[in-house]
Structures are given as structure tokens and as C-alpha cells.
Image (cartoon, helix red, strand yellow):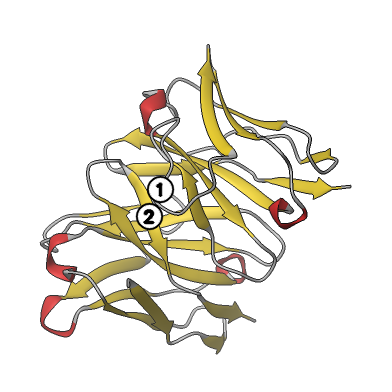
Amino acid sequence: QSALTQPASVSGSPGQTIAISCSGASSDIVDYKYVSWYQQHSGKAPKLVIYGVNNRPSGVSVRFSGSRSGDTASLIISGLQPEDEADYYCISYTGSRTWVFGGGTKLTVL
Amino acid sequence: QVYLVESGGGVVQPGTSLRLSCATSGFSFRTYGMHWVRQAPGKGLEWVATVGFNGDNMWYGDSVQGRFTISRDTSQNTLYLQMNNLRAEDTAIYYCARDFTGQWTIDYWGQGTLVTVS
């Protein structure tokens, strides 16, 4: 159960669009439809922002979307806003009722 | 409104035991799988354990297998994590979380309880 690979940090200016990637071995991401993304502000609990590659829970801004290309899933945040500054984690179901997280990406809004 | 409230954290010595609790409300506890996820200070998230909706099936991460036990009490709408033979590397915030049925992920999280092994 090794962690999925995410960039340690990403930055962007307000209004810009950024993408955070998530990749792993085929044994970790058995199907990309099982990849989800969480937002975690400092000192707070994680919040689900994308599930099933590109589905948004109720109440999550339409500025958040997900995609998959080859062996990489991505979280895309458009129209970057100061409140988007947080840590972001991907997670994947690996099969046999086990899950693995990515190492996390710190998003800085410049 | 889904509520998940963890308790039972604290400072313990290596080799000892601790039991965490997670009181739930706002949803039908008996119909959902539940998870524990932890986060070491300044580090990322780590999946710890999962229990099925009926409590008959449990699954564990490699780092806690054989030492931790996840369980649930449907009559009390409460999730538990029994942690034995604690190690320094178990120091973390422990989050209780609800399984997102059919989506193979987690939807709601509690605020966490801190366990320090020192």
C-alpha cells in the first residue's frame, strides 16, 4: 500500500486555472472511476470535492472538476480564489476493501 | 446533517492500549460502512481501517494489521478503534469517516482526535 504520487506543491494567481496530478501503480489504482479528491484547510477535517473521477458532491463549487488521462488522474480548479488555498489529497480504492491516499499537494494562491 | 464526533485520544506510552470512539448522528448508521483515517503531525492522510455496515467484515492497513481492531455498536450509533501495542509512529490525528455507499470512497469526516504515543 504505497502512497499515490502527487506534486508536493502547486501555485497560481487568483483567476487562473491549476491542475493537481495523481498517479500510481496499476495495483493501487485498479480503476480510475474509484479516484476521489479531498480539500483540507489547515487544522480542519478533509472535505470531499470530487469523486468517481469527475463528480462533484452537492455544495461543491463548479470551479472544481476532475479528469483522467492515461495513468494519471487530475483535479482541476478554475478561477482560482484565495479560499482555495489548502492541501489536496487524492485517494483510490485498490480493491479487496483497501484504500490508498496520495502524499498531498499544497496549493498556494499567490 | 451528518455528525461524526471522535473522542478517546490522549498521551500514552509505547506498548500500551487506547480505545477511540466516534459518536454518529444525522444518518442511518446501521446502513453505512465506516472508516478510520489518520494523519501524523505535518504529514499526509493514511487509511487505517474499515468496517462493513453490518460489522461482520473488517479490513486494515498494513501498518496496523494485528494491532488495531475496528468495531461498531449499532444500538449506540458508535464506531470504535481499539489500538494495542502502540508505537511512536502511531502518533496522529485519528479521523472517523463515513463510507460513500457505491462510490468506494469517503464522504463525511469527523474533526479528529489526537493520539500521542510518547
Q: CA distance from mark 2 to mark 1?
A: 9 Å
- Callouts 2 and 1 close, C-beta under 8 Å: yes
A107 lies left or right of B93: right
Residue highlighted by disc 1? A57
Q: Which mark is residue B107?
A: 2
Depth order, front residue of A51/A64: A64
Tag 2, which chain? B
Q: Amino acid at mark 1?
A: Pro
Q: Measuring from the top left, give residue B28's x and y in whole percent.
A: 16, 69
SS label for mark 2: strand
Which quadrant would residue A24 be assigned to in this image? top right
Which amino acid type corresponds to the residue marked 2 in the rendered image? Answer: Asp
Quarter of the picture holding the N terminus of chain B:
bottom left
The structure residue drawn at horizontal position 37% and vertical position 27%, both measured from the top left corner, is: A33
Q: Residue furthest top?
A: A70
Residue B65 shows up from this direction = no
With respect to residue B38, does A53 lie above or below?
Answer: above
Number of marks in the rendered image: 2
Q: Residue at x 30, y 55 (%)?
A: B99
The spot of residue B82 in percent (x, y) is 34, 76
Residue B77, picture quadrant = bottom left
Instruction: Tell which of A97 and B61 is nearer to you.
Output: A97
**Who's the residue at 82% across and 48% down the image?**
A109
Which marked residue is nearer to the observer: mark 2 or mark 1?
A: 1
